[in-house]
Amino acid sequence: MSTVTPFALLALIGAVSGSVTAWLLLRRDRPAEVLTPSAPPEPVPDEVAARLLADERAARLTALASFARQADGDPGLRQECVGEILGQFEDDWPDSPEWQAELWRLLRPHLRPDSPWFWPGMDLDLAGLVLHAVDLRGCEVRDASFRDVHFDGDARFGGTVFTGTANFAGACFGGRVDFTGATAAEFDFTGTQVGPW
């Protein structure tokens, strides 16, 4: 069995230490490496972007529908769920009319008294948005704010019951408007415009 003498061990440590020191000194004298930005990423093809958009929308709708089912069994969550759905109207998708139609399909059963999923006493706040093809015929809500909304397309409120206030101040209706049989504790149509905008 061979043994390493202390002198051999010290010599080995000195050799390694010297090599590391020499490497560090040489490294210190080298010019700094300049990092250049990489080329911009390739643009996403239109068909891929469309698929990503569809996946994102489907995921959001699935989450909202799940929340709505939970709120069906827990009235304390209902106004929060309505708020989450209304919040999605603020997103500016390339095909906003289709997206909003999906959101109305999800929300409308909870606003119609003849629906088994009706949630009484819900408030709607869509102030300042651009809304496409609004159809709340036969719905019942408490307070609703459509203040400064631009209605793109038809706006149908026939038979809508607002048990509180219905605020349409500053709203612009770009298509046909129907309020036949609509009722409210108080309507506000201050500064409302009808016609192209």
Image (cartoon, grey):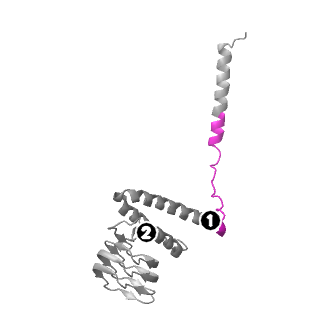
Q: Which residues are magenta?
A: 22-49
Residue 127: name its quadrant: bottom left
Q: Secondary structure at mark 1?
A: helix
Residue 194: name its quadrant: bottom left
Q: Earlier in the sequence, mark 1 or mark 2?
A: 1
Q: What residue is drawn where x is 29% and y is 79%?
A: 184
Above or below 21: residue 121: below
Magenta-colored segment: predominant secondary structure: loop
Above or below 173: residue 129: above
Q: Is residue 74 magenta?
A: no
75 vs 17, left or right, is left
Say which mark, if any, is on residue 109.
Answer: 2
Which residue carries the number 1 mark? 51
In this view, the residue in front, 48 or 58, is: 58
94 vs 185, left or right, is right
How packed mark 1 is, by other alpha carbons closer than 10 Å (few <14, some 14-19, many 20 or more), is few
The type of residue carrying mark 1 is: Arg
Q: Is residue 30 magenta?
A: yes
Spot occupied by residue 191 in the image (x, y as percentages of width and height):
33, 86
How packed mark 2 is, by other alpha carbons closer than 10 Å (few <14, some 14-19, many 20 or more), is some
Spot occupied by residue 64 in the image (x, y as percentages of width and height):
47, 61
CB-based contact (under 8 Å), mark 1 and mark 2: no
Q: Secondary structure at mark 2?
A: helix
Q: What residue is drawn where x is 64% and y is 23%?
A: 13
Q: Quadrant of the N terminus?
A: top right
